[in-house]
Image (spheres, rainbow, N blue to C red):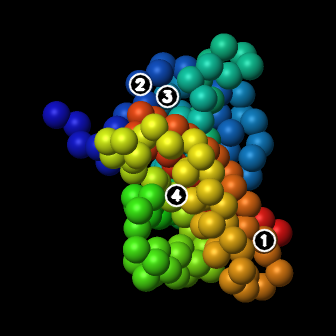
Amino acid sequence: MIGKEKRDLPLANERIRFDKMQLIDQDGENRGVISRSEALSIARSAQLDLVLIAERGGAGFPVVKVMDLGKMLYEKKKQVNEAKKKQHVIQVKELKMRPKIADHDFLTKMKRAVEFLQEGKHVKVTLVFRGREATMKDEVGREFFQRIMDVISSADYNGRTVAQESDSHAGSLWSRVFVLRK
């Protein structure tokens, strides 16, 4: 069984099984179509590796290049790490509450919501309706979310404003996502 590392490596040196190939030397010059053994000897004489670049080139032959395989893999790994650093994952924090929540509990949850927003996270507030509460869901929910918006927008976000991004109803749940906008 071939390990994951070997499968991810490009074909190089003796692992290249084509009889004829188009060779590009270490200076980037096209050396034309040559035999496998000749290409390997050129790579060895330069103390570098023979790496498969493309299975089918312009002339219909595989394209190989004389280069340092370790250096190429290092550069590729560096590029992947740089790309990962530039990615920004948005975290969504969810706060669940019932419409009949006590004032102190409500303010505590709103304090956490403000902290999450200041940290740059999105806040999803979910109202859970039970039993007969669901019959007044639209009216109570609208008032409750307006109350939440009033409390959240009163905080200081360094010139940024709070906006509602999405709204979803699912059975006895009503959720809204709050985000900061510039």
Left or right: where 36 falls relative to 129: right
Residue type pointed to by label 2: Arg
- Which residue is denoted by mark 3 in the rendering? 36
Marks 3 and 2: in contact by CB < 8 Å? Answer: yes
Residue type pointed to by label 1: Thr
In what element is the residue under mark 4?
strand
Q: Is label 4 or label 3 in front?
A: 4
Left or right: where 13 falls relative to 60: left
Query: In the depicted view, which residue is nearer to us: 54 or 46?
Result: 54
Q: Position of residue 5 (x, y in %)?
A: 32, 48
Q: Earlier in the sequence, mark 4 or mark 3?
A: 3
Left or right: where 162 falls relative to 2: right
Q: Earlier in the sequence, mark 3 or mark 1?
A: 3
Q: Position of residue 156 (x, y in %)?
A: 73, 85
The answer to whether residue 153 is seen in the rendering is yes
- Which residue is denoted by mark 2 in the rendering? 17
Query: In the depicted view, which residue is nearer to us: 145 or 46?
Result: 145
Q: CA distance from mark 2 to mark 4?
A: 56 Å
- Which residue is denoted by mark 1 in the rendering? 161
Using the rendered view, name the quadrant where residue 29 is placed.
top right
Q: Residues within 10 Å of mark 2 (few under 14, many from 20)?
A: few
Label ID, residue 124: 4
